[in-house]
Image (cartoon, rainbow, N blue to C red):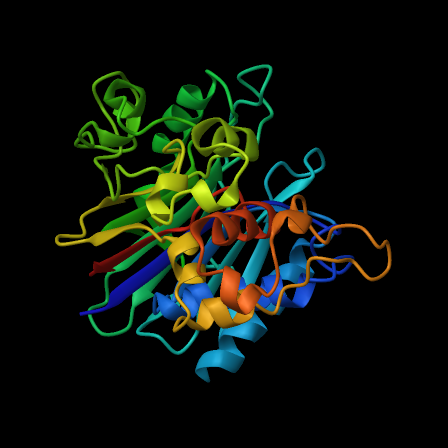
Amino acid sequence: MANINLLSWNIEVFGPGKYGNSANSIGLVNLIAQVAVQQNSNMVVLMELMSSVAQQICYSVCEAIANATGNPWMYVQLQARPGGDRESYGMLWQTNANFAVLNNGAGQMNVGLSPLDFPCNFSDREGRRAALATFRTTDTNNNFTVSVYHAPPNARAIRGLEVLAKTPGLYTVDNAGAAQAVGMRLLGADYNLDVNIQPEYSWLTDPVPAAPPPAAAGQGAGTAPITAADTTLMNMSNAVARWGNDLAAWSNVATDYRALQLDNIFWAAAPGAVGGPVDLVAMIMNPASPVRVIAQSFVTLDAVTQGPAFPFAFSLPPPLNVNLSLGCCAWMLARYGVSDHLPVFTSAAI
């Protein structure tokens, strides 16, 4: 039986300012890769990669994972709204795991954007689309599809979930020219909705109709959320309002620094799937963690500009190899040096 270990992560405006033009650009790539390694991931989907450097980011993260594990990886970078969006997705996977990407009858990989029209911030059209990749397990010969989607940050997010659920590629796939059913689907996304408000997710959680995809209210993608825990991190004003200006008074409990639940993985037909948010703050606080080793190599001073290497970097008291054990410092580095979102992970068997 094949195990699919999926890490889904919104890296928060991962563009030239964080990749290539930052004093910590190499450290950030290595940190992302090490989180994937620590979760034993064999597939990673990334959001908020700025299109100008998205391909370079995917290549660098793949190389970092391969160097850390000895396993070969490959990637596909897809612009979320071709010709009209600065954001791209990254879909990365281990090529010697017990699954392989399916090819269609034209010899092309079954990887691409949903053909449907998704909402943007201002209308129900021309927004970021979901990306999908369909694979087949090499030991059990089962098809599964992984998707990644970044919904608009307003009420149109619900419309985005409806369009996602109606995407045909979640249910059938062209395998070398023959239409086949998809036996499992894993939907990684920043949904921009609180998963605990269940009616907003009905298009994902309602049952699949006899002839998918769903087309009417009451029908859905037949999936379930992997986590109900918070996956975004509070900001500095939240922290100061909660604990005051004295860092010594701030919490050393990593989960205290979480805010809303927006990121998730929804899964279907994967009995026993487990997972949840990956607590990056706790990893950084732990001196024995390889993620901590990378984090404490970050610099707070940009040698070129003589300014902070990332927002609030000068609030972190040195030395980092000592003070990153404090919740306040680990959170500030994670929140402002890496991302305001926590990665979400699931392990599913097919």
Residue that appears at 22% across and 24% down: 219
Query: Is residue 305 found left or right of 250 in the rendered image?
Result: right
Say which of 332 and 225 sits in front: 332
- Above or below for 297 versus 231: below
Q: Is residue 71 left or right of residue 25?
A: left
Task: Identify the residue shown where x is 48% and y is 34%.
Answer: 239
In the rendered image, the vertical position of residue 260 relative to residue 226, given as above or below: above
Quarter of the image holding residue 298? Answer: bottom right
Q: On the rendered image, what quadrant is the N terminus found in? A: bottom left
Residue 209 showing in the rendered view = yes
Q: In the visual, does 65 lie left or right of 288? A: right
Q: Is residue 297 above or below residue 47?
A: below
Outermost residue toward the bottom? 70
* Numbered label tally: 0
Instruction: Please say if 50 is above or below 36.
Output: above
* Quadrant housing residue 243: top left
Camera-nearest residue between 17 and 176: 17
Question: In the displayed structure, does residue 347 sit left or right of residue 52?
Answer: left
Q: Position of residue 127 (x, y in %)?
A: 58, 27
330 or 152: nearer the eye? 330
The x and y percentages for residue 85 are 68, 35
Q: Residue at x 44, y 26 (%)?
A: 160
Q: Residue 64 location, x and y as percent?
A: 56, 73
Q: Closest to the observer: 44 or 142?
A: 44
In percent of the image, x 52 and y 52: which residue is there? 329
The C terminus appears in which quarter of the rendering? bottom left
Q: Is residue 133 visible?
A: no
